[in-house]
Amino acid sequence: MSRLEPRRSRRPDPAPPARRPAGSPGRARDASRDRRAHYRRTARLAFLIPAGLYVLFAFVVPVIYNLILSFEVTTPATIASLFAPWAGLSNYTSTLSQSITQSAVVRTLTFTVLSLIFQFLIGFGLALLFNLKFPLNRLARSLVIVPWLLPFLVTGFIFRFLFQLEAGAVNQVLQDVHLINQPIGYLLSPGWAYVTVLITNIWLGVPFFTVLLYSALQDMPPELKEAAMIDGAGPWQCLTRVTLPVIRPVIEVTFVLGFVFTVKVFDIVISLTQGGPANSTQLIATWAYNLSFQQFDYGAGAALNTVLLIIALLVAPIYIRLNRDSLRRG
């Protein structure tokens, strides 16, 4: 060792921790702590088991069974057995080549787009109204949620009585104000039946848009609007350049969820028109029901249900991305 090199003090290596005796209190505390951690892990798994079973039997098993049916030639005689003659893609090709199926797909997309546009316009208008201070504001907000409290089938039957030809409330009111001279068969004409189903679905979806957009307006900082008004912005400029850009993430997520809810509409059509007249109100979900349980072509109905599932799944990544982006902005 050189003289210029400093002398290093040699520290003794740390002694390994002494093992506690088997009967010591510390050893008992460690064992008790390990048991409690094991019980907590077991409890977490026990609480997850019911949720996992629910997802398995309510979602996974029906989807898999529907997928299997879509590739088989299934009749009422073979529906009880899991395996039937293999059909390949014939169920998909024969079903999608039908004119009724093609019109149902187009009608479902147009029905969804029109419903979302009017639901957003009416819901956003009500959200702006409820964002103001006026008497009975809370009561009005509570009444807007009433359509969501009613089952969809009940709502369909209510609108069926409102729009019926004889003694219908809509025809009676229009005749009283002298807008029409004779009752209109809303549920008997293909065009009017489609409009009736559309109006019913819009009425059901307005509360969903109103509640979410009103919550977004409540979370918006008031300083932004005040600063814009100080800079000379008018009400329309405050709405288009301040309010809408701030709540845009909520609007995007609301549209995506509204699309998923609307593209699979079933109860309203069944209770109002049952797909008629002349299949003019058939949507994908109702036509799949017609194929499966009225024509007993389970393979074709399962194939159409699979197409509907694929359409809904295509929107899922968009929703996840929009939700992630909104969380990052927050």
Image: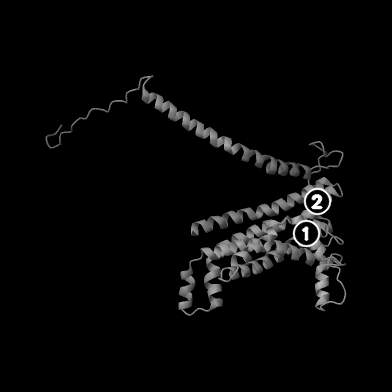
Locate residue 81: give its quadrant.
Answer: top right
**Farthest left residue in view:** 3
Q: Which residue is mark 2?
A: 289
Where disc 1 sits, the SS reads: helix
User: Which image quadrant: the N terminus?
Assistant: top left
143 sits to left or right of 30:
right
At label 2, the amino acid type is: Tyr
Residue found at x 49% / y 60%: 329
Q: Nearer the viewer, mark 2 or mark 1?
A: 1
Viewer-proximal residue among 88 and 306:
306
The residue sitting at 71% across, 51% down in the picture is 309
Q: At x 74% / y 49%, what residue is drawn?
A: 306
Q: Quadrant of residue 182?
A: bottom right
Q: CA distance from mark 2 to mark 1?
A: 17 Å
Residue where numbered disc 1 is placed? 156
Task: Say which of 304 and 131 sits in front.
Answer: 131
* Image location of residue 31, percent across then percent down: 43, 26
The answer to whether residue 104 is seen in the rendering is no
Left or right: 222 with respect to 111? left
Q: Position of residue 267 (x, y in %)?
A: 76, 55
Mark 1 crowd level (few <14, some 14–19, many ≥20, 10 Å Cα): many
Q: Residue 200 got which mark?
A: none
Looking at the picture, how far across and down is residue 27, in whole percent? 38, 24
Classify mark 2: helix, strand or loop. Answer: helix
Residues under numbered marks 2 and 1 in contact, where contact means CB atoms less than 8 Å apart: no
The number of discs equals 2
Q: Amino acid at mark 1?
A: Gly
Taking the view exactly as shown, the residue that stands out farthest to the front is: 135
